Structure formats: C-alpha cells, structure tokens
Amino acid sequence: MNLKKQSLIYLLASLGLFMFNYIYSLFSHGVSSDAMSGMWHYTIIMAILSGAMSLLSHNQLKKQIRLAALMINCGVATIVSGHLLTGIVEIAGTNSVYIPYYDYSGWLFILVGTLIGCFRLVIKHPPQSLD
C-alpha cells in the first residue's frame, strides 16, 4: 500500500466531489443540500490522515495494516455515497428510510478497520502472503 498515492487519490476524489456538487447545484434551480455540500469533507480528512501516516510509518507497518486501510476506505466510500444519495433525495423533495443505513454501515466499516489496525499493531503479526 502506497500511502502517498492513496493520499493523492483522496485529494483528487475530494476535488471531484467538490466540483460535482458545484455543477449539480448549478442545475438544481437554486435548491441545495447540506449533505451533498459536505460530502467531500470525509475524503479530504482521509487525504490528510493518509498523508500523515505515510510520513510517520515504515514499510513493514504499511504492509501489516493493509486490511484495516481497505476497511476504512470502504467505510469512507459508503458514507460519501450515502451523503450523495441524501443530497439527491433532498433536492428532489422526498425522503427514504434506507439512507441512514449508509452512515451506519460506513461507520461500522471504519470502526472494524480501526480495531483491526490496532489489533495488528499490538500483536505485530507478519504480513500474510497471498500465495
């Protein structure tokens, strides 16, 4: 896992989400959504965190926390998708009972990923081979 590359991807995703929100607001007839306006904040925070981790960690550590990083990435993607869907539904003037499950499952992914990462750091297992 290359954390510098991951940080760059998060920055580009943040820029893309910000531009998507701006363009979407141009065509939404003056109606906006707080959920959609703030969806890029999650990716910019992850860009900062992964950039800091790349400066502070060594290669062996990066290999050990691969699964944790993937779980956290899935959580962020799920939360951002939920905010995008919430924004679209709010702008359309309707609602859905299923949208909160995006936040619940996203935060669950982040929690599980964080616990796996902490467990791997405490136990210090060698990286698993995919062979």
Image (tube, rainbow, N blue to C red):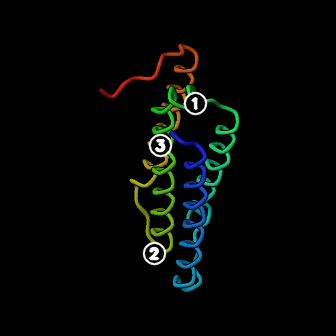
Rendered view: 76 above or below 82? above
Q: Residues within 10 Å of mark 2 (few under 14, many from 20)?
A: few
Q: Nearer the viewer, mark 1 or mark 2?
A: 1
The location of residue 79, given as percent across then percent down, is 50, 51
Q: Residue at x 52, y 29 (%)?
A: 65
- Residue type at mark 1 is Asn
What residue did someone put label 1 on? 59
Q: Quadrant of residue 129?
A: top left
Label 1 Cα crowd, 10 Å radius (few <14 / some 14-19 / many 20+): few
Q: Looking at the image, which is closer to me, 5 or 76?
A: 5
**Residue most extreme to the left:** 131
Residue at the disc numbered 2: 92
- How far apart in space, not on screen, are marks 2 and 3 (Cα)? 23 Å
Q: Nearer the viewer, mark 1 or mark 3?
A: 1
The kind of residue tagged 3 is Tyr
Q: Identify the residue shown where x is 52% and y is 77%.
A: 24
In 3D space, how far apart are the residues under numbered discs 1 and 3 (Cα atoms)? 32 Å
- Secondary structure at badge 1 equals helix
**Camera-side residue of 78 and 30:** 78
- Of the numbered discs in the image, which one, if any, rests on residue 21? none
Q: Which mark is residue 104?
A: 3
In this view, 122 is above or below 90:
above
Q: Amino acid at mark 2?
A: Ala
Q: Earlier in the sequence, mark 1 or mark 3?
A: 1
Which quadrant, please, contains the C terminus?
top left
